[in-house]
């Protein structure tokens, strides 16, 4: 039997169509294709893929189930270790994780592990009739700060063991980056809502509109009877470049732009929350957030969208599939370019001109890669006298985010590092007794899956600590 | 869902509501604000906490009907619910060590200034209140202000009540007459806060202003509410939702703040018209 050297193609909405709408880009394998793709898995003995997964999903086992046509069984295998399978299948950078270790990948293309995971999760959501059941309570109460991937995972794992968990979310909808950061065309919000519903079925209590550090402090949570607290508050503080013109109208942090579009649904016709639509847009940055912002701007009707990134394609950190999709959609990649100033309209004759204060362009400089820095990444260096102006009316800064200092400022004894990340032991315990942390709040902005891994690790540690009482 | 316990019309454009939100009521201090949504598809808007009742677990908000969301909010009645209500956000107003304060309130800004005036009064400071309105129909909270001020001046732009003129006039007179305030607190439209600051600046009296930019999340994650302070010639970016809403008036770039506040002007006007039409149609 000849093994297919390439992954089975993922049905994808055509670039010209999808660049103007918010429907999902990757449409998912039909069942027959999923089974064919599953046959490519050699079920090899040493299973390197499992070690490549930050939550160690039992990959060969679920793939074998798909191959046998037991799709619900495949879902059950995945959900033993992952609490958000429909999410991970869509947003994990498999090319640097499980698929990068795949034995098939040595000579051929790796098995489409991500696509199969998505298939199993979607099949379950479409076909399963039984709701998850909350196990009997063990009497212990745990509080989780933040309903993003790390918080939801920690809550889910503890709930399955009988803990009574309350998740406190600052925004009005649960999901964290899954709802405010990642756009509808990559991760439909209905899917996130379904995952959250499953957690509620498991007995997790989700309290929205509670800002820990303002509405309640962590110390007050202990006073209220919670025995342990997991901090999954993320890295939501946006970085700005601090170049001139950054406060002009039309300059957004990627967080603001994406929150308006995704969470506040500004992408709809006639939304209650406005967002600048159309025009010519420059997105500064090269990560997944930059890709999301650029592709969102395109779908909101922009006539031209630039990605302005100071290094080259090799260093661009975004997930490969997002970069490919972005290029197919016509996003203009300006690599080895860096902004130096944002220009705005000023009518000296009329201070009341309504166009005053809006972005009219962005001055950039060309870069070249110089000597490697301490981490081995080649440092971008400006090329003298190479400035030029990009004709844009919207600038989106997607240059990274840092942990919000609110929790640190209101929790005595909680130690953080120089980047604001909460300092933790290997099991997630912070410098405060019974307070754990994980995800972006610890590492700075990273991935959904590594946040989930941290949530799992902390749940295990909390379970051990509270069981010992 | 958060229940509207009480609704009071203060004047044709300003409404007061008491919302049941015990966690917020328990924590909110003068100067802090909340963010609310009226319904599920609605926008998030910030409103300053005008007072709390810890026993009943309610938070008082006073809002001017200026756009789509405040129009929808005003359409709600006692016993009905609003979708979301979160707080308390922002840094409370600093009142320590102040013995003599002048509180200047402009228009609906007086509603925001009220709890601050009360706080200073309760801690024993001498409070001079200057409140100004466009005309006498827009007057609000005069009695409440009088109750916590040692001296109160009421101004109207058109002279239909109190003294004729804007709030900077009596302030300038007092400063020129040698009044020594430890602090001036100015709360109202941006242009008013800018001119109160300019009036006080030559006399070297510190001025605290309460900034009210467009906000989305209110917790420091988006930077939409950012403003610029000029400190010793250097321009520094601050987020009004977490560093403010109070700032040193002498440092604030008001012109930039005013420009940024107009970013969605056309959109907002259109949305307001649409909402009014919708509500009128629904009521018909």
Image (cartoon, coloured by chain):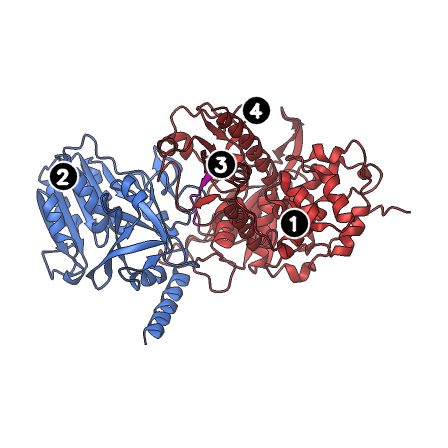
Whether the residues at callouts 3 and 4 have beta carbons within 8 Å, the answer is no
Whether the residues at callouts 3 and 1 have beta carbons within 8 Å, the answer is no
Whether the residues at callouts 2 and 1 have beta carbons within 8 Å, the answer is no
- Secondary element at image label 2: helix
Q: Nearer the viewer, residue B3 or B255?
A: B3
The magenta stretch is A164-172
Chain of the residue displaying label 4: A
* Residue, disc 2: B121
Marks 2, 1: nearer the viewer? 1
Tell whether position A171 is magenta.
yes
Give the CA separation, mark 3 to mark 1. Answer: 25 Å
Give the CA separation, mark 4 to mark 1. Answer: 30 Å
* Residue, disc 3: A163
Marks 3, 4: nearer the viewer? 3
Specify the chain shown as blue: B
Residue A121's label in the rendered image is 1
Whether the residues at callouts 4 and 2 have beta carbons within 8 Å, the answer is no
- Secondary element at image label 1: helix
Specify the chain shown as red: A
Q: Locate residue A7 relative to residue B103 in the image: left or right.
A: right
Marks 4, 2: nearer the viewer? 4
Whether the residues at callouts 4 and 1 have beta carbons within 8 Å, the answer is no
Whether the residues at callouts 2 and 3 have beta carbons within 8 Å, the answer is no
Labels 4, 2: one chain: no
Which comes sooner in the sequence, label 3 or label 1? 1
């Amino acid at each position: 039997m000849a093994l297919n050297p390439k992954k089975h193609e993922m049905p994808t909405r055509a670039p010209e169509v999808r660049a103007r709408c918010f429907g999902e880009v990757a449409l998912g394998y039909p069942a027959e294709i999923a089974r064919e793709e599953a046959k490519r898995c050699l079920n090899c003995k040493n299973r390197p893929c499992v070690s490549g997964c930050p939550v160690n999903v039992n990959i060969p086992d679920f793939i074998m189930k798909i191959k046998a046509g037991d799709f619900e069984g495949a879902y059950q295998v995945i959900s033993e270790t992952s609490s958000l399978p429909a999410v991970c299948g869509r947003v994990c950078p498999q090319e640097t994780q499980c698929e990068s270790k795949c034995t098939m990948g040595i000579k051929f293309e790796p098995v489409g592990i991500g696509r199969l995971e998505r298939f199993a999760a979607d099949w379950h959501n479409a076909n399963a009739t039984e709701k998850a059941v909350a196990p009997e309570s063990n009497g212990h109460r745990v509080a989780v700060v933040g309903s993003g991937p790390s918080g939801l995972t920690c809550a889910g794992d503890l709930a399955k063991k009988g803990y009574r968990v309350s998740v406190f979310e600052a925004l009005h909808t649960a999901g964290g980056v899954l709802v405010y950061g990642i756009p509808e065309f990559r991760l439909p919000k209905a899917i996130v809502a379904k995952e959250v519903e499953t957690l509620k079925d498991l007995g997790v209590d989700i309290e929205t509109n509670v800002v820990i550090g303002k509405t309640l402090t962590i110390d007050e949570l202990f006073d209220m009877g919670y025995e342990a607290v997991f901090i999954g508050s993320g890295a939501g503080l946006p970085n700005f470049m601090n170049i001139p013109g950054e406060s002009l109208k039309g300059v957004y942090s990627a967080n603001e732009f994406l929150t308006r579009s995704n969470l506040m649904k500004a992408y709809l016709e006639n939304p209650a929350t406005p967002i600048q639509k159309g025009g010519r847009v420059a997105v500064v940055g090269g990560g997944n957030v930059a890709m999301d912002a650029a592709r969102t701007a395109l779908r909101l009707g922009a006539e031209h969208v630039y990605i302005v990134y100071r290094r080259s394609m090799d260093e661009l950190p975004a997930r490969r599939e997002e970069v490919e999709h972005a290029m197919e959609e016509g996003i203009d990649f300006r690599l080895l370019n860096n902004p130096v100033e944002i220009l705005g309209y000023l009518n000296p004759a009329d201070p009341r001109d309504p166009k005053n204060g809006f972005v009219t362009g962005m001055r950039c400089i060309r870069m070249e890669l110089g000597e490697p820095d301490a981490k081995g990444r080649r440092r971008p260096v400006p090329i003298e006298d190479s400035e030029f102006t990009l004709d844009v009316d919207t600038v989106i800064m997607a240059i990274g985010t840092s942990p919000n200092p609110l929790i640190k400022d209101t929790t005595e004894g909680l130690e953080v590092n120089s980047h604001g990340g909460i300092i933790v032991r290997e099991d997630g315990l912070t410098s405060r007794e019974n307070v754990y942390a994980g995800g972006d709040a610890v590492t700075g902005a990273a991935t959904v899956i590594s946040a989930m891994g941290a949530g799992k690790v902390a749940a295990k540690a909390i379970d051990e600590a509270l069981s010992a009482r | 869902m958060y229940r509207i316990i009480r609704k009071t019309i203060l004047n044709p454009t300003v409404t007061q509501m008491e919302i049941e939100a015990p966690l917020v009521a328990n924590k909110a201090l003068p100067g802090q604000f909340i963010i609310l949504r009226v319904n599920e598809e609605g926008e998030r808007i910030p409103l300053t906490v005008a007072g709390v009742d810890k026993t009943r677990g309610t938070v008082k908000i006073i809002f001017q009907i200026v756009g789509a969301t405040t129009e929808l909010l005003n359409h709600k009645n006692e016993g009905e619910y609003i979708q979301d209500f979160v707080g308390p956000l922002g840094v409370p107003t600093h009142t320590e060590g102040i013995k003599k304060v002048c509180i200047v309130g402009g228009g609906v800004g007086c509603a925001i200034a009220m709890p601050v005036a009360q706080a200073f009064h309760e801690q024993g400071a001498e409070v001079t209140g200057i409140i100004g309105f466009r005309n006498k129909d827009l007057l609000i909270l005069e009695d409440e202000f009088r109750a916590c001020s040692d001296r109160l001046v009421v101004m109207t732009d058109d002279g239909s009540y109190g003294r004729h003129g804007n709030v900077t006039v009596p302030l300038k007179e007092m400063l020129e007459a040698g009044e020594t305030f430890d602090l001036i607190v100015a709360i109202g439209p941006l242009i008013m806060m800018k001119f109160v600051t300019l009036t006080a600046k030559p006399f070297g009296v510190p001025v605290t202003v309460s900034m009210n930019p467009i906000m989305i999340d209110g917790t420091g994650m988006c930077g939409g509410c950012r403003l610029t302070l000029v400190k010793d010639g250097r321009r520094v970016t601050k987020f009004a939702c977490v560093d403010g809403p109070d700032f040193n008036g002498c440092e604030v770039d008001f012109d930039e703040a005013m420009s940024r506040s107009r970013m969605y002007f056309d959109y907002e006007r259109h949305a307001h018209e649409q909402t009014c039409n919708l509500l009128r149609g629904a009521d018909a």
